[in-house]
Image (tube, rainbow, N blue to C red):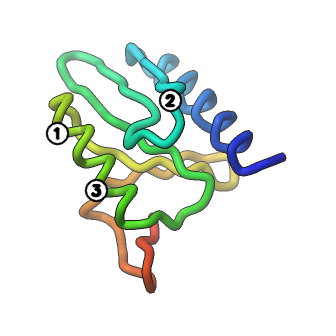
Amino acid sequence: MSNKSKGIKKEWLLKRHLEDEGYLVIRSSASKTGVDILAGKNGRVLAFQVQTSDYIYPEKVRELERYAEAFGAEPVLAVRKNGKWIFASPGDLKRSGRMFKIS
């Protein structure tokens, strides 16, 4: 399975997870945008970038923040490991060489 296919699968998994938690969810099918999913519940709006690994380039984080600001949303990075979702805000990331690590 390609990384793109894995990413799309994880986006759909997150969409279903958020809907089960009562969020209204929109998944972006546009490739290479700064946000994969917008979710809202009780006036709170979240903008998600779904990752297939726990490493992310700084440029992708900046794009997520740019989109989140435009939509008045909180930026959230999501990665699924060992069957569980890990969520992080850009401020939670640790520098690892040229990239950031979601932990």
The residue at the point 25 percent across, 27 percent down is 45
> Horizontal and vertical percent for residue 78?
47, 47
Kindly identify the amino acid type of the residue bearing the numbered disc 2. Ala
Query: Would you identify the image quadrant in which residue 81 lies?
Result: bottom right
Decide which of tag 1 and tag 2 comes sooner along the chain. 2
The percent position of residue 14, horizontal first and vertical second, equals: 55, 32
Q: Secondary structure at mark 2?
A: loop
Residue at the limit of the structure toward the bottom, as seen here: 97
Residue receiving disc 2? 30
* Quadrant of the image occupied by residue 99: bottom left
Crowdedness near tag 3: few (<14), some (14–19) or many (≥20) residues, C-alpha within 10 Å: some
Question: Which residue has dot 1 on it?
Answer: 69
Amino acid under label 1? Glu
- Residue in the image at 43% along x and 30% along y: 37
Mark pair 3, 2: CA separation: 18 Å
Labels 1 & 2 near each other (Cβ < 8 A): no
Q: CA distance from mark 3 to mark 1?
A: 11 Å
**Which comes sooner in the sequence, label 3 or label 1?**
3
* Residue displayed at 38% across by 43% down: 34
Q: Secondary structure at mark 1?
A: helix
2, above or below 59, in the image: above
Q: Amino acid at mark 3?
A: Arg
Q: Total marks drawn?
A: 3
